[in-house]
Amino acid sequence: MKNIKERIWTDEAAVYKYTSEEERMLSEAYNKVGYVKDLGATTYFSTEKKRREFGAHFTSVDIFKKFIFPEIKNILYKYSWIDLFAGEGNLVLPILEAIPKNKRIEFFKEHIFLFDIQKEMIEKAIGNAKNYGIPYEIAKKNIQQRDTLQDYPDFKYLKHSFYHITNPPYLYLGYIVKSYERNLKYFSGPNEGYQDLYQIALINDLRQNIEKLIYIIPTNFLFGFSVSNKIRKDFFPFYNIKKAIIFEKKIFEFTGTNVCICFFEKKKETSQKPIIFRALKINTKIIEKEYSLSSKNFYRAGGEFDEFISYFKSSSPLKIKFYLTLEEIEKNKGPKEVKLLDVNNFYNGYFKFNTYSVNEILYRKLQNNPLFVRTLDTGSWAGRAGIYNVKEIFGVDGIIVTKEKYRTHPIQIFLTPELSRDDLILLKNYFNLMLEYFRDITDSEFLTTFKYSKSDYTRKYLGLSQTRKLLETFPAHLMISEEKQILRILIEQKNIEGIKDVLLDLNKKLENRITLF
């Protein structure tokens, strides 16, 4: 039979158009396996294997001249300028342009010291020093190959105070475990618990009691949760941030990671007081903003969201489970057919779906839990992080994990107690409204920046712990129909203060009931 079906691909799901009932019946078997396009197809930037292995990103001279040099130009002779992860030397060697040519050699001898783990980078840095008029024999004494993460240099011989300016390697521990186990050595012993190579660099400087630091590091240092809670908790009792420049656009050729420049200064005394500083945020526009980092929140920036989920948590919250696994399918085989999206089978923007036979219990569970969380912005306004309906977006009954669980793919949500269809819609609308509200008032700072893209907004990652805690503020399972209707109207009106009042009133009523009993 010709033209059994016509397949129409939309941005949200695969839709099949049949020309007759006979064709529909003939194609049923075919439709048990297929592919669904996802809004979240991500374009990954290619990098050289060695660059990824060492976690190095190379800083241009322009970045130094525009953002760093103005802060140090009046104190050049006061310090020794060190870069322990120097690459080609672009964060320190341009200082020589401000030194008279007839004094450069002596200045270099006393004030500039560069190190890098890669031999070829050292050779390039020495070549750059020669371009500033430094003889090779002198340059090679102060520019040396060394694994400074593991072998910190001894600077007791320096005539001047140590000022560390660096763009350290950043390579997330999770990636190292998967790809480059040689780097796991950095995370053992006293470094256990840190999550990225740049964090090892920071804690090494703290242990060496270095007073002044300028670091170019991922913005997850300021805004991340588990990835950076430990380093902030350990670091900020000893250091203040005097100033920061936060980039939400691509500034390096070989990485899409958003970065910031932090100007650190050692405290005179250890203190748990809030870290207060002003920062410039640079994207399509420049915004100046004041930040206050509190030890109560692991010194994390963007605390308004955390305050809300803590203060408005329901006295009897929903119980939330994430992920549908292949193991659960195997344990619940039966006669009911369901189409499940395989998030571990993704290629070129499409997820594969398969048909599984399950028992009545799991079938009803899937029918009664049709929501999933998109933890990662896709780059389109229709694909922002939030809660969506599986059937509406992908045209399937559920989302299955057949291999590893990843936090960046679509994840199905299972709720206890189960909610009615109207309450599920109310939950979805509530969650997405509150999420967008906090994104608006904080410029999405409570979310982790993902990677650079050419989208209209900076792509962010919503953590599963954040998802859970925001869901725990939703009390519809405890509300009578009149209260739900009020909440529904407030959500439609986007009346945030009204929603807060409803949540507070409900919690007070529930607390009073508990007190009475």
Image (tube, grey):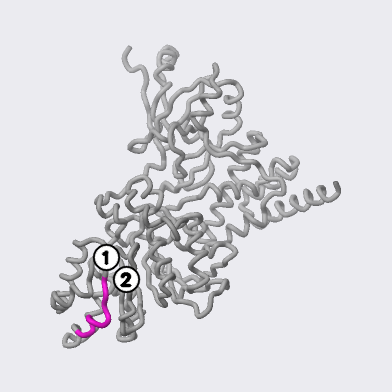
**Which residue: 50% across, 80% down?**
268
For label 2, the SS is: loop
Q: Which residue is tagged 2?
A: 153
Q: Tell me which label, 2 or 1, sits earlier in the chain.
A: 1
In the shown orientation, is residue 285 left or right of residue 107?
A: right
User: Quadrant of the rendered structure where residue 30 is?
Assistant: top left
Q: Is residue 306 left or right of residue 475?
A: left
The label on residue 191 is none
Query: Magenta includes 73?
Result: no
- Element marked by disc 1: loop
Image-based side of 428 in relation to 242, left or right: right
Camera-side residue: 14 or 323? 323
Q: What's the magenta region?
A: 106-114
Q: Is residue 338 above or below residue 89?
A: above
Q: Quadrant of residue 138?
A: bottom left
Q: x%, y% of residue 450?
A: 41, 53
Marks 2 and 1, Cα distance to the nearest angstrom? Answer: 8 Å
Q: Residues within 10 Å of mark 2 (few under 14, many from 20)?
A: few
- Dots 2 and 1: beta carbons under 8 Å? yes
Q: Amino acid at mark 1?
A: Arg
Can residue 282 be seen at all in this image of the molecule?
no
Return the residue at label 1. 146
Residue 222 location, x and y as percent? 47, 63
The quarter in which the N terminus is drawn is top left
Residue in the picture at 27% in, 81% down: 111
Please, is residue 161 above or below residue 125 in the view? below
Q: In this orientation, does residue 224 appear?
A: yes
Q: Quadrant of residue 62?
A: bottom left
User: Mark 2 belongs to which amino acid?
Assistant: Pro
